[in-house]
Image (spheres, rainbow, N blue to C red):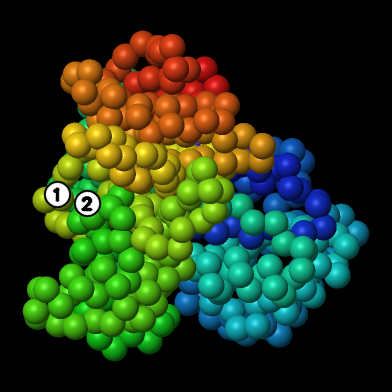
Amino acid sequence: MVIQRHNYLEKLIARKHNKLIKVITGIRRSGKSFLLFNLFKSHLVSNGVDKSHIIEIELDDRKNRALRDPDNCLEFVTKKITDNKMYYLFIDEVQYMSEFEDVLNSFLHIDNLDTYVTGSNSKFLSSDIITEFRGRSDEIYVRPLSFAEYCSVYPEMQWEDAWNQYYTYGGLPYTVLLNSEEDKSNYLKRLFEEVYLKDIIERNKITHDLQMKMLLDIISSNIGSLTNPQKLENTFKSVGKTTLSAVTIKQYLDYFIDAFMVEKAERYDIKGRKYISTPQKYYFTDIGLRNARLNFRQQEENHIMENVIYNELRLRGFSVDVGIVEINERQDDGKYVRKQIEIDFVANKGSRRYYIQSAFALPDDEKIRQEERPLINVSDSFKKIVVVKDNILLRRNEDGITTMGLKQFLLDSNSLDL
């Protein structure tokens, strides 16, 4: 079965012949290579490009080991170009090549060569290329399947069944295509140990990997919870089995982020219009990997739902912060106390902004007031939304707050503007 990634394919098509290196990044096994070597290649061929004008190099394949040498790769590609027609160069896992930035710069000087590369590490790609290329690269970040993409694979599946599968096993394409729950579970656990952790340990030359794994367990158990390196250091001390300094913890967290395994959401003071450096929240790029790390034991659907909403907002191109609203709250004795309350997500893209609460359930008026209270205390005119798990009809109250069901939020790409 072929899983179409229309959103990413359209981005690649729109960037053809733009005189930039197209850099396709994302977590391993998210479908970067399939997007480039299958979907985009099929697009080129169906639009008249001769296959001899598509140069494919998979650097993670040992048979191409010689091409990891930058000079060998440059010579190999230039010899393939034998006429003045446009050629398309695909390089998979370009970080296997030393001095790859210099080689890619050389490819930019070949007028009839359109270059596309993939990679799975932000330190090797995003930051380095921005520095080295100075605006001569174009990054496309590929995520695991969204819930809408998952449903396109199994359109006959009922909403509740699809949601249960997705929030348990996530959206890595190969996982989605496996039939049995045992196969999905085993694949994810094996992938975590043999690919993601091994890659992080080897790349960063980590010697005390047991401590790093313990930190990963803590992060996995507390998705969506405010934390920071100092707080995590105290957690290690309270356990008593080992110690890990805040400095090392921050370094390990950065390694997880560089591998695209987790993302960090900063706190933003809405009224003060400033960022608060600590604490932050961490969310997993694929919720199935998070669940696999915990051996599928901690299935708190409310926290998982929050992580999925975060991923959906990032997929739609928003930067996402945790909103902080400061209020004066009257106590029983009549005195007022200054207090900070939280909005789950402040989503920004260009001039657009949305304030979003993830509320698993709204069983009574007290819970409704609790979720709406931070939104009511924001004085600007940007849209305010509460997303609930139940499949409800969209409604708005007199304060202008929209409440919608999770199904509508995830499956309607225009849900934020309804």
Give how far across and how far down residue 385 sits, in percent: 43, 26
Residue tagged 2: 291
Q: Is residue 222 left or right of residue 237?
A: right
Q: Which residue in the rendered view is the most extreme toward the right?
A: 84
Instruction: Report the Cα–Cα distance between label 2 and label 1.
Output: 7 Å
Q: Which one is in front in this view, the residue at disc 2 or the one at disc 1? A: 1
Residue flagged by tag 1: what amino acid is it?
Gln
Crowd band around label 2 with a 10 angstrom C-alpha radius: few (<14), some (14–19), many (20+): many
Q: At 28% from the left edge and 35% from the top edge, which residue is drawn?
A: 330
From what the image shows, is residue 368 above or below residue 3? above
Q: Quarter-wise, where is residue 317 in the image?
A: top right
Q: Is residue 312 visible?
A: yes
Near-viewer residue (59 or 133): 133
From what the image shows, is residue 201 above or below residue 303? below
Residue tagged 1: 298
From what the image shows, is residue 51 above or below residue 348? below
Q: At 42% from the left edge and 71% from the top edge, which residue is drawn?
A: 254
Near-viewer residue (160 or 183): 160
Near-viewer residue (187 or 295): 295
Q: At 22% from the left edge and 79% from the top edge, which residue is drawn?
A: 211
Q: In the structure shown, which secondary structural element does the residue marked by tag 1 occupy?
A: loop
Q: Quarter-wise, where is residue 136 in the image?
A: bottom right
Numbered-mark total: 2
